Amino acid sequence: MARIVKVFAFVGLLATLAVVVAGVMTVSMIRRGFSARDQPSTIEATLASMMRSWSMTARAATLKSPIQPSPGILRDARSHWADHCAICHANDGSGDTQIGRHLYPRAPDMRGSATQNLTDGELYFIVENGVRLTGMPAWGNGREDSLDSWQLVAFIRHLPALTKEEEAEMRKMNPVNPGERSEEKEEEDFLRGTDGATSHPSRNDHSH
C-alpha cells in the first residue's frame, strides 16, 4: 500500500512539474512574443523531431531506393536541387541561405547525422509529403515511385562529399530573381559600352 502511495505521489510530482514548466514557457513566450527570429528551444526541437517521426507511415522507413547512384543520376539531381531546393537548403545542403536561416525551425544542415542517419525511405517520404509545422512543403503526389524524389535522396546522400566543382556548377543553375537579373544586364551593358542610356533629341533642338 505504501509503495502504491509513493508511485501516485511521484506521478503527481511529475504532473506538477510539467504544469509549472508549461506555465513558465507560456509566460516567457508571451513576454518575448512568437518571433521566428528566436532559436527553437530544446523542447521544441525534440517535439518537432517526434512530430516528423510520427507523421511517417510504418512502411516509409522500409522503402528501398529503386535506383543506383551514377554520375548521370547525380547530375540530374544536382540540377533539380539547385533549381528547387537550394533556395532554402543551399547548394551544399547547409541550410545557410537567407530563407533557411530565417525559417522556424531553421533549415537543417543535411550533411549532418540528423539527416544522414534517416533511411532512404524516410528521406523519400519527407521529400514527397513534406513536414507539417515547418517550412518543408510536399513536393510529390504521395506515391512511392517518383524518380525525381529518389534522385534527390541519392543527392542528399552525396552532400557530405559534394565537391567545390559540383557546387560551382550548381550556382549556374540557381534561379535568378528580377533584381539580380537587372544587375546582370547592367553589368553586360557596361562591358559592351552601352550603359542602357537611350539617346533622345534635346527638347531645345528644333532642327528637322
Image: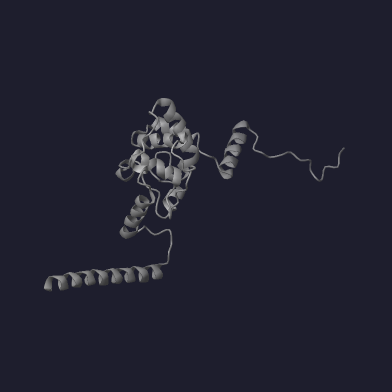
> Which residue does the image show at 36% across and 43% down from the upper left?
59
Q: Residue furthest right?
A: 208
> Which residue does the image show at 71% across and 39% down from the upper left?
198
Residue 87 appears at what percent x and percent y? Answer: 47, 44
Q: How many marks?
A: 0
Quarter of the view holding residue 105: bottom left
Q: Is residue 42 shown left or right of residue 101?
A: left
Whether residue 93 is visible: no
Residue 115 appears at what percent x and percent y? Answer: 34, 43
Residue 118 appears at what percent x and percent y? Answer: 32, 42
> Which residue does the image show at 45% across and 33% down from the upper left?
77
Q: Residue furthest top?
A: 71
Quarter of the image with the C terminus is top right
The colour style of the image is: one colour
Quarter of the image with the N terminus is bottom left
Q: Residue furthest front?
A: 1
Q: Nearer the viewer, residue 101 or 54?
A: 54
Say above or below: 24 vs 133: below
Quarter of the view holding residue 19: bottom left
Q: Nearer the viewer, residue 201 or 90?
A: 90
Q: Is residue 32 shown left or right of residue 3?
A: right
Whether residue 198 is visible: yes
Q: Is residue 193 shown left or right of residue 205?
A: left
